[in-house]
Amino acid sequence: MPAGGQVAHFGRLRGLSRRDASSRAHALLGELGLEDRWGDRTDKLSGGMQQRLQLATSLVHDPEVIVLDEPFAGLDPVAVASLSETLRLRARDGRTVLFSSHQLDLVQDLCEDIAMVDHGRTVLLGSVATLRASSGRRQLRLHVEAPNRDWLLAFPGLTVVSDEADDLRLAVPAGMDPLEVLDAARAAGRVVDFGLDLPTLSQLFLAAADRAVDPAGVR
């Protein structure tokens, strides 16, 4: 069956008229970058195209709740960006979007609320913004042109996460003012770039999963 015909067929199964099903199928294939594949057989499409086609068949009847399993698997960066925007638009229109994914950078960018599971155990649950902000973990990112790192000795609680060329990433403990660290860096050399980052979901998950290990090492 041609790709466009498949999407329209699923629309008809959901009660759409032939005209509406075809119209929505055309619109969705255009939105997902498949407009030139309308007449192509589905088995001739690449894996990424088939993934987007499956999404189109799921959205053709404009559902109130959208449930997806690993929707970004096998997609190239352009397709990921296109699919991400499609899901954002549905969420802005009041649709509920629920999906599973191991790609935590995309989860962080797209989701408002999450549940993270490790070996069948929920280790993180709640708002992405709240989980990141309430973790107490902060990292100061610095690009400082200094001859050495001796200025760091004034901050014994500071942890160097990474030190590559002039790029430093420092874990700032609770109670330490990151502006004082920045001032010390500026006194030591020219600071080209800086920023204070909250922990990523990947970092939070690794920490939470580690805490979930019992003393015997069995989860």
Image (spheres, rainbow, N blue to C red):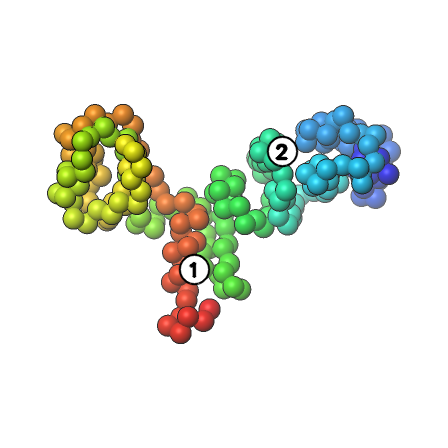
Helix, strand or loop for disc 1: helix
* Quarter of the rendering containing residue 186: top left
Label 1–label 2 contact, CB within 8 A: no
Residue 76 point in image, percent of width and height: 61, 35
Judge by depth and name the residue closer to the eye, 147 or 57: 147
Residues packed near mark 2 inside 10 Å, few (<14), some (14 to 19) or many (20 plus): some
Residue 67 point in image, percent of width and height: 65, 48
At x 19% / y 45%, what residue is drawn?
A: 176
Which of the two labelled residues, at mark 1 and mark 2, occupies the earlier sequence position?
2
Judge by depth and name the residue closer to the eye, 22 or 214: 214
At x 71% / y 27%, what residue is drawn?
A: 30
Q: Is residue 61 left or right of residue 177?
A: right
Q: In the rendered image, is residue 155 in sight?
A: yes
Helix, strand or loop for disc 2: helix
Residue 152 point in image, percent of width and height: 17, 41
Residue 41 point in image, percent of width and height: 83, 36
Amino acid bearing label 2: Ala
Question: Quadrant where the N terminus lies?
Answer: top right
At x 52% / y 64%, what residue is drawn?
A: 119
Q: Residue 209 has which mark?
A: 1
Q: In the rendered image, is residue 141 in sight?
A: no
Distance (Cα) linking label 1 and label 2: 31 Å
* Quarter of the rendering containing residue 35: top right
Q: Which residue is mark 2?
A: 79
Amino acid bearing label 1: Ala
